[in-house]
Image (cartoon, grey):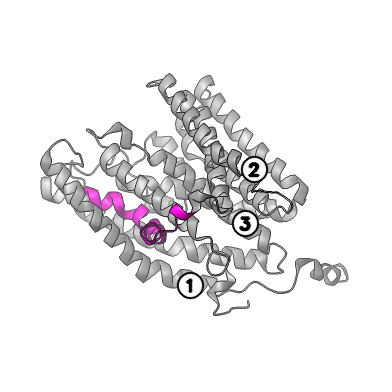
């Protein structure tokens, strides 16, 4: 169990870090907050309901970063050990901490009318990342303050097998595998939303229904790490892909009206492809990349995880304590409280990031990748 003090050994931190992706994560965090605070409330502004796009980008970004890391380090003899130690330190402690704090707040406050709890899920379901199964059973997201955590359950389930796919599959098959997984998700949603085989909730909150986003990111990582691609030559077309796919998704949304089936089936796929192309634009240094290197966006990117986990609880408690009602922007008082909740949510997320997330993540990054290659162990094992 080799450990080191060099954080730069992690491609996610140090010389190999792509700063623009931190800014992109920060912008998506702002999208989520704006959507939940001003778009997805009873009298919200529909044009500000951008959270679903941000969630898709988060999935694609996770797929890209994990895929890139695997491709760079999968030959290390201790790859699986170090990968999962680092993943655990990066994602689990602050998640458990934030979920526990929010859960305790809900328990201490009881169930006032301003706390939106359509169904109660046990704490262990959040700790085991199985809350998406409870969401399907109840056909709702349960306690509203913890509703964003379903996306994390999808990602954690993805992390369980994604490394094995990349490590043991032949390199030439990685891109076809990613394309097959994305196509499978599209077909699954088509069967669910158009065929009515099972509850639509199952396709929305489970890993198979979101595989196109995660594997679109991994496909982008494969392309990024493939030698011989002249990205400069394809730059114009690459920059057009996000625009075209976003317009296609918006047209589907307009054509679909209240049903949502076309958007959820094909629109999500288009957005996944567009997000993957946009990430490739940033990592290849197109003009878009510079816009995401601002200190403000990078700050939101650095605190995004804790803010994402706690921002709904902050908004809910401020509206509940000050106005005695659930969050909304129907009158001046509600708008004022919602605006006041913005800096509070950011501050809470920043504090949790500093006291929990950063120290434990730094410890995880101290686990060094072995210089010994996996292939070098095979003769020794064969001779045992």
Question: Can residue 348 be seen here?
Answer: yes
The residue closer to the viewer here, 64 or 288, is 288
| Left or right of 178, for residue 85 | left
Label located before the other in sequence (2 or 1): 2
Q: Residue at x 64, y 46 (%)?
A: 219
Q: Residue at x 25, y 37 (%)?
A: 41
Pointer 1: what residue?
362
Label located before the other in sequence (2 or 3): 3
- Kindly identify which numbered label has been placed on residue 274: none
Q: Residues within 10 Å of mark 1 (few under 14, many from 20)?
A: some
Question: Can residue 203 be seen here?
Answer: no
Pointer 3: what residue?
68
Pointer 2: what residue?
234
User: Which region is colored magenta?
Assistant: 290-316
Q: State which mark lies toward you, 2 or 1.
A: 2
Label located before the other in sequence (3 or 1): 3
Mark 3 falls on what kind of element? helix
Q: Residue at x 69, y 62 (%)?
A: 74
Q: Residue at x 56, y 48 (%)?
A: 281
- The percent coordinates of residue 214 (x first, y second) are 56, 45
| Figure check: 26 above or below 204 | below
Q: Residue furthest right?
A: 383
Q: State which mark lies toward you, 3 or 1.
A: 3
Q: CA distance from mark 3 to mark 1?
A: 20 Å
Which quadrant of the figure contains the C terminus? bottom right
């Amino acid at each position: 169990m080799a450990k080191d003090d060099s954080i730069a050994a992690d491609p996610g931190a140090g010389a190999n870090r792509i700063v623009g992706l931190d800014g992109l994560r920060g912008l998506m965090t702002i999208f989520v907050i704006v959507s939940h605070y001003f778009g997805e409330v009873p009298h919200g502004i529909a044009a500000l309901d951008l959270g679903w796009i941000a969630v898709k980008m988060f999935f694609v970004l996770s797929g890209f970063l994990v895929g890139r890391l695997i491709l760079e380090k999968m030959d290390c003899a201790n790859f699986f050990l170090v990968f999962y130690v680092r993943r655990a330190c990066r994602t689990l402690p602050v998640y458990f901490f934030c979920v526990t704090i929010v859960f305790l707040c809900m328990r201490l406050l009881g169930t006032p009318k301003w706390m939106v709890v359509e169904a109660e899920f046990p704490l262990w379901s959040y700790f085991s990342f199985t809350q998406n199964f409870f969401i399907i059973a109840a056909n709702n997201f349960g306690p509203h303050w913890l509703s964003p955590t379903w996306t994390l359950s999808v990602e954690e389930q993805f992390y369980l097998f994604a490394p094995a796919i990349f490590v043991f599959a032949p390199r030439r098959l990685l891109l076809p595998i990613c394309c097959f997984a994305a196509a499978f998700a599209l077909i699954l949603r088509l069967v669910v939303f158009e065929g009515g085989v099972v509850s639509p909730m199952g396709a929305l909150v489970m890993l198979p229904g979101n595989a196109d986003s995660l594997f679109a990111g991994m496909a982008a990582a494969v392309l990024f790490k493939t030698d011989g691609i002249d990205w400069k030559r394809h730059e114009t077309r690459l920059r057009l892909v996000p625009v075209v796919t976003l317009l296609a998704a918006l047209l589907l949304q307009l054509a679909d009206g209240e049903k949502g089936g076309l958007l959820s089936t094909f629109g999500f796929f288009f957005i996944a492809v567009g997000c993957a192309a946009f990430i490739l634009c940033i990592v290849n240094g197109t003009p878009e990349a510079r816009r995401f290197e601002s200190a403000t966006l990078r700050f939101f990117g650095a605190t995004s995880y804790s803010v994402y986990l706690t921002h709904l609880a902050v908004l809910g408690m401020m509206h509940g304590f000050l106005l005695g009602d659930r969050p909304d922007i129907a009158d001046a008082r509600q708008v004022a409280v919602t605006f006041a909740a913005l800096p509070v949510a950011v501050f809470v997320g920043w504090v949790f990031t500093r006291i929990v997330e950063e120290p434990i993540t730094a410890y995880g990054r101290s686990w060094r990748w072995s210089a010994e290659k996996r292939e070098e162990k095979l003769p020794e094992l064969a001779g045992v």
